[in-house]
Amino acid sequence: MTTPPTDLLDDPERAEGWWRLQATRLPESPTPTPAGTRLLRAALRDVFDAHLEGRDPKKTSVDDLNAIAASVPTSPRLLTDPRPHRRTRWHTEHGGNPALAAIAAEAIHLLGDQARLATLRRCANDNCSMLFLATNPRRVWCTPNLCGNRARVARHYARTHQHDDA
């Protein structure tokens, strides 16, 4: 019997925790709303699934992805303290959420980079919905310590208990 998937967005505390974990990788911003997060997730899932399935994504998914990426314009800034370095300024004067916009923009960069896009994989665990970029061509699980271990444990159990049913 398989366990039904868990939607982390249904639990506000877990969703907030996930966003906190991503804070160092994303531009400073308020936590995105669940509705905005769901919209981006649905668009990304359709666009990535379309690639993996060899089909065209829904036009609405592409439109949503582009709109979210464009919702917070950016501009490069040169800062000179202590040495010259580049920083991106997120223009939130007219709304939008920088975290969602950054994720959408990164997805667009990925979709436009055929070499990186060729590494996109679906986890081999039938009970997992994760997608990942395989840095090793032999990688088949999203995380070796979770889905990989589950598969190894299941294979071991099947081997060691194959005669228990007789």
Image: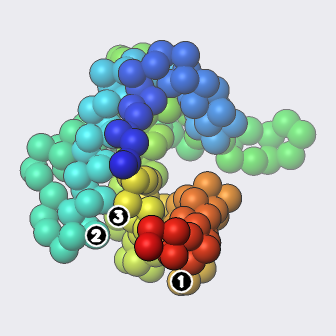
Separation of marks 3 and 1 at Cα, in angstroms? 19 Å
- In the image, what residue type sits under mark 1? Pro
Mark 1 closeness class: few <14, some 14–19, many ≥20 residues within 10 Å: few
Q: Quadrant of the C terminus?
A: bottom left
Q: Secondary structure at mark 2?
A: helix
- In the image, what residue type sits under mark 3? Leu
Circle 2 sits on which residue?
A: 52
Q: Secondary structure at mark 3?
A: helix
Residue at the (45%, 68%) spot, across then down? 165
- In the image, what residue type sits under mark 2? Leu
Q: Is residue 29 left or right of residue 145?
A: left
- Which numbered circle lies on residue 111? 3
Identify the mark nearer the N-term, 3 or 2.
2
Residue found at the very far right of the displayed protein: 82
Dots 1 and 2: beta carbons under 8 Å? no
Residue at the (40%, 42%) spot, across then down? 3
Residue found at the very far bottom of the displayed protein: 137
Q: Quadrant of residue 115?
A: bottom left
Front tag of 3 and 1: 1
**Residue 61 to residue 113: above or below:** above
**Residue 72 to residue 46: above or below:** above
**Residue 40 to residue 162: above or below:** above
Q: Quadrant of residue 161?
A: bottom right
x then y, percent, for residue 44? 31, 48
Circle 1 sits on which residue?
A: 137
Identify the mark nearer the N-term, 1 or 2.
2
